Every structure is written in C-alpha cells, then in structure tokens.
C-alpha cells in the first residue's frame, strides 16, 4: 500500500507548475506521515524549478517549508503521535552513522544528505527515484527530520521558519547577537525580514541596509531601529566600522566592498 498524493510539479525548466499525482511510501518503523497544511515559497524552489543551478531532474515538486499534522506513525516513532503539529525543512534523511551526523550536523553528512526535493531517494518504497517536496498534500519523513511546531503559532506564518527562518536565525545565534550590539541586515526579502525580526527580538540595535526607501519603511514596521540607504555614499561612509555584525541576505552576486 502507498499514499496517493496530489501535488504541483514542473516538467521542464520553462513550464508552469501543473497538477501531478504520485505516491509516498507508507511509514517505515521510524517514519512520520504528515498531512501538509501549508508550505512556504522559498527562492530555492524557483531556482530549482527553473534549473538555475543545473541539477534539477523532472518531474520536480518544490517546497521545503512544510507545516502539517501527523496522521500516521511507524511503530518505533517516539517523538510524535497522530494529531501533532509538525514541520519539515530542507533535509529529509542522512546516514545517521558518520561523525557529522553524530554531531547533529546532518547537512555535512559524509555520505550525502537527502534534500526534501530533487534528491536521490535512498529509502525508496515508491516507483520514484527522486524526493518530492511540500507543494503536495502529504509527506512521509523519518522522525529525525521532523520538527515540533508550537500550537500557539499561526501554522501558515510559521512555514517560512523552516528555511528562511533557520537560515537567518542560525548565524545570529552562532555569533551571539544580542543586546548592546549594532546589527546591519542587508536586503529585505524572504530572509531579510526574518533577520530583522530575529535581531530585534534578540535585543540588538537593528539597522536595515537597503537601496529602497520603501523597504526601509517596511523594515521599521518589522522592528528595525534605523534605515541606511546603501546608494547614499555619504551615509555609507559615515556608518563605516560602526557595526558589530552584518547579515547579508542579498540572493544575487553584488559588490560587497561598499
Ligand atoms: Zn529554502
Ligand atoms: Zn552521515
């Protein structure tokens, strides 16, 4: 038996997302099966759908900011039960045996992690040799790669935490950003708005660095204390060496010297 799933897929780098039906594996002993409620749209989804990184295989089902409710669990699952609100991010498997996996750094797995979409499906259980992401009704994931989502969070708003959120939270946390520090967040897109909110919540003095006055206004609504317009060379010069930490969220190549 397998789990039939409706989804949206692209079939080439230039085609639209279209309805696509496929099968997920039934839960193995350590798996959690999830009814997907919401899935964020990450720019990586678009890069991948358009094969802008050169590795996409089709059909391609994007989505790695997944929120849903558990509807079935394998008999060895200990962390989750039916009905739990859960999330799945960018990874769905790794070897679990190597030094990196033992250190909780599955993204550096010596044997290669499995991405939530577009990766070789090493577990199998369905006709597909690829993983399919969260633009779909359901997903089956090993419990090691499932996260608990607090019931007091709006599940739709929580979805982007699974990629844009962790991508900005991780460096801010790693470098101990907090009160008494001046932190510049460069760019206000999917990542930048998370960076502003996190840095503000961590108690830092937050400066939005942007080319756009309009985005500066939006950043202040999200918690930025100041706006620095990067096209204003005098303002940029005045800000030189004043930051404790800079988080660059610009998704395209650009001159970082200024
Ligand atoms: Zn992403
Ligand atoms: Zn590993």
Image (spheres, rainbow, N blue to C red):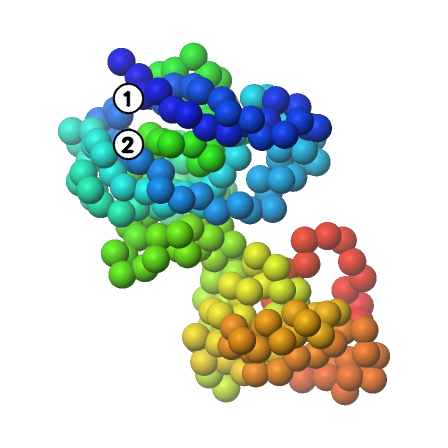
Residue hosting label 2: 33
**Residue at screen point 58% across, 30% down:** 17
Image location of residue 55, percent across then percent down: 64, 29
Looking at the rendered structure, which numbered label has been put on residue 26? 1
**Residue at screen point 57% across, 83% down:** 225
Residue 169 falls left or right of residue 150: right
Mark 2 burial class by Cα count in 10 Å: few <14, some 14-19, many 20+ = many
Looking at the rendered structure, which numbered label has been put on residue 11? none
Q: CA distance from mark 1 to mark 2?
A: 8 Å
Dividing the image into 4 quarters, which one contains the N terminus? top left
Image location of residue 117, percent across then percent down: 50, 32
Q: Quadrant of residue 218?
A: bottom right
Image location of residue 140, percent across then percent down: 33, 30
**Residue at screen point 74% across, 76% down:** 229
**Residue at screen point 60% across, 46% down:** 43
Mark 1 burial class by Cα count in 10 Å: few <14, some 14-19, many 20+ = many
The correct choice, above or below, for 24 with respect to 208 in the image is above
Image location of residue 77, percent across then percent down: 20, 35
The correct choice, above or below, for 208 with respect to 53 in the image is below
Labels 1 & 2 near each other (Cβ < 8 A): yes
Looking at the picture, tell me which residue is in the foreground, 214 or 66: 214
């Amino acid at each position: 038996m397998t789990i039939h799933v409706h989804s949206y897929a692209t079939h080439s780098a230039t085609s639209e997302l279209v309805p696509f039906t496929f099968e997920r594996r039934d839960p193995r002993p350590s798996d959690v099966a999830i009814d997907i409620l919401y899935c964020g749209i990450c720019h990586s989804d678009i890069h991948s759908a358009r094969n802008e990184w050169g590795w996409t295989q089709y059909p391609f089902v994007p989505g790695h900011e997944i929120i849903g409710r558990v509807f079935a669990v394998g008999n060895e699952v200990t962390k989750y039960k039916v009905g739990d609100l859960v999330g799945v991010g960018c990874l769905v498997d790794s070897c679990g045996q190597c030094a990196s996996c033992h250190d909780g750094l599955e993204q550096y797995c010596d044997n290669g992690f499995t991405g939530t979409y577009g990766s070789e499906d090493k577990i199998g259980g369905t006709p597909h040799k690829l993983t399919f992401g969260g633009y779909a009704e359901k997903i089956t994931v090993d419990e090691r790669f499932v996260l608990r989502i607090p019931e007091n969070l709006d599940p739709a708003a929580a979805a982007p935490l699974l990629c844009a959120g962790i991508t900005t939270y991780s460096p801010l946390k790693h470098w101990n950003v907090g009160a008494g520090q001046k932190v510049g967040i460069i760019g206000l897109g999917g990542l930048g708005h998370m960076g502003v909110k996190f840095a503000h919540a961590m108690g830092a003095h937050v400066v939005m660095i942007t080319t756009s006055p309009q985005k500066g206004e939006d950043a202040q609504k999200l918690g930025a204390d100041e706006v620095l317009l990067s096209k204003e060379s005098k303002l940029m010069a005045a800000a030189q060496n004043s930051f404790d930490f800079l988080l660059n969220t610009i998704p395209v190549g650009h001159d970082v010297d200024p």
